[in-house]
Image (cartoon, rainbow, N blue to C red):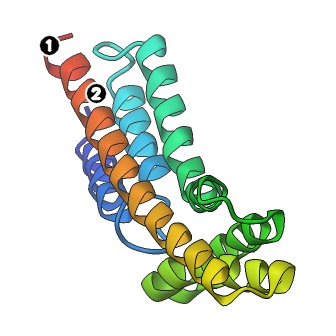
Amino acid sequence: MDPLLAFLAIAAIVIGVLGVVLPLLPGTPLIFVGMWLATWADGYARVGGGTLLGLGLLALLGWLVDYVAAVIAVKRAGASQSAMGGAGIGSVAGLFGGLPGLILGPMLGALLGEWVSRRDPARAARAGVAAGLGFVLALVLKLILAAAMVGWFGLAWFVG
């Protein structure tokens, strides 16, 4: 394998793993790109198309988790549709605010959505806390998915 391609593949995987916890880096998609690059550079000799497809699905799931976890958590807390919509909007808007934005965006969005809908401070606070818990759950799920991707790829690459 070309050393430059190997370096780029490893760099993408490492940056992707960091991106699972750091804001504005698409963690699992970057991990997948690095794995695909390594596989391509190796001529698909060690890792096959089925494994790459599975890794791609895990990467997609990891990417989607960021956007839906807060909404699901808010819904499970019994909040209004406005709170769920606010959590979704806050999740997307929070992407531009770094780590504080990623945490506070869904929380503030859910809180404001519930406040606009019901004008009940206790329910609004509960919706905001649920969105925050959704962020933590999303982080844990992304870490699990990233570990699964790296483990699966490693098994396919080295054990084959």
Front residue of 29 and 80: 80
Residue 28 in sight here? yes
Q: CA distance from mark 1 to mark 2?
A: 10 Å
Residue 135 tag number: none
Q: Residue at x 26, y 49 (%)?
A: 10
Q: Residue at x 36, y 54 (%)?
A: 12
Estimate the x, y position of residue 39 in percent, counting from the top left: 37, 27
Q: Residue 112: give x, y in percent of width and height.
A: 73, 86
**Image height of 66 relative to 62, above or below:** below
Q: Is residue 157 left or right of residue 43?
A: left
Query: Of residues 14 and 71, which is closer to you in this image?
Result: 71
* Amino acid type, callout 2: Phe
Q: Which quadrant holds residue 158?
A: top left
Q: Residue furthest left?
A: 159
The residue under the point 36% across, 31% down is 41
Question: What residue sits right under mark 1 in the picture?
Answer: 159
Q: How many marks?
A: 2
On screen, residue 60 above or below 99:
above
The crowding category of the residue bearing disc 1, from other C-alpha atoms within 10 Å (few below 14, some 14 to 19, many at least 20), is few
Quarter holding the C terminus is top left
Of the residues under marks 1 and 2, which one precedes in the sequence? 2
- Residue 132's x, y, as percent? 48, 72
Quarter of the image where one finds residue 43: top left
Provide the secondary structure element on which disc 2 rests. helix
Residue 119 left/right relative to 21: right
In the picture shown, does residue 74 fall above or below 145? Answer: below
Residue 51 location in percent, x, y? 41, 17
Q: Residue at x 71, y 66 (%)?
A: 88
Residue of label 2? 153
Residue type at numbered disc 1: Val
